[in-house]
């Protein structure tokens, strides 16, 4: 299955945006958590699109909460300020083939998908830092705690 982003890019994002250092195993764990949440969001969106008889998922189908939307805005503002490149949309679309279940992604989804994916990747780290602001190198347990929190909230 395609990955949303490569581990070196994820490690660079974490250093730059969250202030956490990830070794390869922790980066893989973060990627697994974020990809699961991305898949969950798109499973719900695909169900909504099918229920309305549409063959494509539109942005409005995604269950984006107020907090997630605010975090997306925070990331995008910081990304622009730092001049950080957007994530490439093609690997993300490849990853989403299964959750989309044959449906297409609408134009707005394609446009906003790199920000959503990056936000979900960083959200794991934001949760770790929220629980322990002094954290620098998250442990397996830190990331597992973040996963449980995100499972309850997203």
Image (spheres, rainbow, N blue to C red):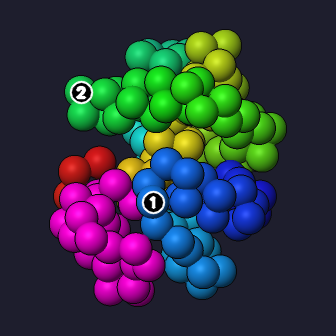
Residue 64 at x, y = what percent?
A: 34, 30
Considering the numbered disc 2 on the image, is that residue within a helix, a strand or a loop? helix
Whether residue 37 appears in this view of the structure is no
The magenta stretch is 125-150
Whether residue 75 appears in this view of the structure is yes
Q: Is residue 124 above or below residue 143?
A: above
* Distance between the alpha carbons at the discs numbered 2 and 1: 24 Å
Q: Measuring 57% from the left and 64% from the top, which residue is drawn there?
A: 31
Residue of label 2: 66
The dominant secondary structure in magenta is helix
- Residue 63 sits in quarter: top left
Q: Is residue 147 magenta?
A: yes
Left or right: 149 as drawn, with respect to 17: left
Q: Is residue 78 above or below residue 1?
A: above
Q: Which residue occupies the foreground of this view, 58 or 7?
A: 7
Left or right: 136 as drawn, with respect to 81: left
- Mark 2 or 1: the one toward you: 1
Q: Is residue 137 above or below residue 152?
A: below
Q: Measuring 68% from the left and 52% from the top, which residue is drawn there?
A: 4
Left or right: 25 as drawn, with respect to 74: right
Quadrant holding the N terminus: bottom right
Q: Measuring 32% from the left and 73% from the top, which residue is drawn there?
A: 135
**Label 1, residues with CA under 10 Å away: few <14, some 14-19, many ≥20:** some
Residue 24 at x, y = what percent?
A: 65, 80
- Residue 103 sits in quarter: top right
Q: Is residue 82 above or below residue 138?
A: above
Residue of label 1: 19
Considering the numbered disc 1 on the image, is that residue within a helix, a strand or a loop? loop
Residue 148 at x, y = what percent?
A: 26, 69
């Amino acid at each position: 299955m395609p990955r949303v982003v490569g581990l070196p890019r994820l490690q660079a994002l974490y250093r730059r945006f969250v202030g956490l250092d990830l070794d390869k195993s922790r980066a893989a764990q973060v990627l697994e958590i974020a990809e699961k949440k991305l898949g969950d969001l798109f499973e719900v969106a695909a169900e909504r699109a099918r229920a309305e008889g549409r063959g494509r998922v539109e942005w409005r189908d995604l269950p984006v909460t107020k907090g997630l939307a605010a975090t997306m805005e925070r990331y995008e503002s910081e990304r622009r300020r730092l001049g950080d490149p957007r994530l490439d949309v093609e690997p993300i679309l490849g990853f989403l083939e299964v959750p989309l279940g044959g449906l297409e992604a609408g134009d707005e989804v394609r446009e906003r998908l790199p920000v959503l994916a990056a936000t979900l990747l960083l959200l794991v780290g934001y949760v770790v830092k929220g629980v322990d602001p002094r954290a620098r190198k998250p442990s397996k347990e830190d990331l597992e705690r973040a996963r449980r929190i995100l499972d309850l909230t997203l």
